[in-house]
Amino acid sequence: MEYVLKIVNLAVSRRERTQLIPVLNDINFFVEKGELFCLVGESGSGKTTLALSIMRLLPKSFVVTSGEILLNGQNILNVNEQSIRSIRGKDISIIFQDPGAYLDPLFTVGVHLQEALHGTTEDKNQLITKTLKDVGLEPEIQLVYPHQISGGQQQRVMIAMALINNPSIIIADEPTTALDVLTTRQIINLLSKIREKYHPAIFFITHDLELAMSIGIRIGIMYKGHIVEIFRPDREKPLHPYSGILLGNIDKKYFNEKIPVSSQTDINDWCPFFEKCPEREQKCQKKIPFIWRDSLTGIRCIKHGRNHQM
Ligand SMILES: Nc1ncnc2c1ncn2[C@@H]1O[C@H](COP(=O)(O)OP(=O)(O)OP(=O)(O)O)[C@@H](O)[C@H]1O
Ligand SMILES: [Mg+2]
């Protein structure tokens, strides 16, 4: 197995006055070379925090409290600011949800692309024209300013900037959330065409499990800063009760009311889904490890994990 990205025991907290509030806990997963890995989770679950940790772009109030982030084998948490700048954009790049907010209104599309380009032996203008063609844009768009083009075109420019240095992995943080249904489909098709042509791995973040199921090779489900399940949509059904709820398979009215949430013990260490789990049992009131089912998939659930442990 060849990993582009491997994350080991990552934990990230947010500083609030004198307190450290955990945002990501015990994150362990990897993205294989050329893989399309989708991360799905509700708002506030920590998806963007994870993406920004990988890019080393976390705001100052966040601290990585433990773990490693290996990009092509190198722990990027240990490299200095200058090295991370050359890694960013070149080996790894990111596309954000709102391209309009990211693109600078004072500079033309052409300037954005030139700025994004790291050292190359190829002719710069030819490379920019080729990359624009790859994302379905005409070379003339270089002369216009970001506000003169549509949201879909702006996102294509962002994708061109992410693609231009031929990175080994592209992170796409909800890249279609601000777009209409038709444009969303076009952008998704574009990303899959790019993957076929240049084989970057894509780490695709979305809150839409159905969308993830339609494009992802593997899917990670995130809940309250934990990855609770990783599965392959074309091979197996997700088994975590939270995944079931996301899929609409479990009716919330069947929540197990019998086991009250104890206020006496510290529930922070328990299964993160305990409070809302329709299948919760007494034995779930403890720290639950992520149990790998095989080398690619696994689950953070005692009930469903045990049956599938090899
Ligand atoms: N700049 C910030 N200042 C304070 N708290 C923040 C900040 N950014 C994120 N948080 C908190 O960190 C946690 C994780 O947020 P994050 O943005 O990573 O979630 P997300 O899964 O990307 O959500 P969304 O789907 O809304 O984009 C949340 O509890 C959020 O309130
Ligand atoms: Mg987010």
Image (cartoon, rainbow, N blue to C red):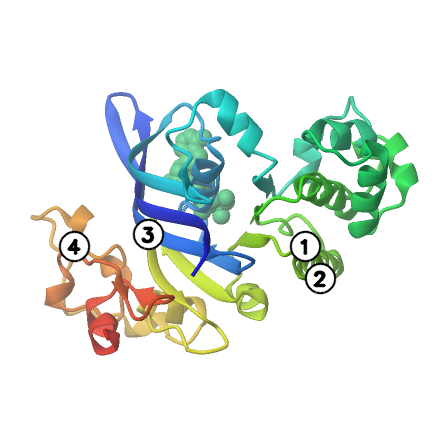
Label 2 sits on what residue type?
A: Asn
Q: Give the image location of residue 18, x and y in percent.
A: 24, 21
Disc 2 versus disc 3: distance between alpha carbons?
Answer: 29 Å
Residue 188 appears in the rendering? yes
| Sequence-first tag of 1 and 3 | 3
Q: Residue at x 59, y 40 (%)?
A: 93
Disc 4 crowd, CA 10 A, few/some/many (<14, 14-19, 20+): some
Q: Residue at x 73, y 43 (%)?
A: 160
User: Depth-wise, is mark 3 or mark 4 nearer the camera?
Assistant: 3
Q: Label 2, on which residue?
A: 189
Left or right of 114? Residue 2 is: left
Q: Name the mark on residue 287.
A: 4
Rendered view: 60 above or below 140: above
Q: Secondary structure at mark 2?
A: helix
Q: Secondary structure at mark 1?
A: helix
Q: Name the mark on residue 85.
A: none
Disc 3 versus disc 4: distance between alpha carbons?
Answer: 15 Å
Q: Secondary structure at mark 3?
A: strand
Is the CB–ligand 1 distance for label 3 below 8 Å?
no
User: Depth-wise, is mark 2 or mark 3 nearer the camera?
Assistant: 3
Q: Give the image location of residue 127, x and y in percent.
A: 80, 39
Q: Label 3, on which residue?
A: 28
User: Depth-wise, is mark 1 or mark 3 nearer the camera?
Assistant: 1
| Sequence-first tag of 3 and 4 | 3
Q: Give the image location of residue 100, x and y in percent.
A: 71, 36
Q: Label 1, on which residue?
A: 198
Q: Nearer the viewer, residue 235 or 173?
A: 235
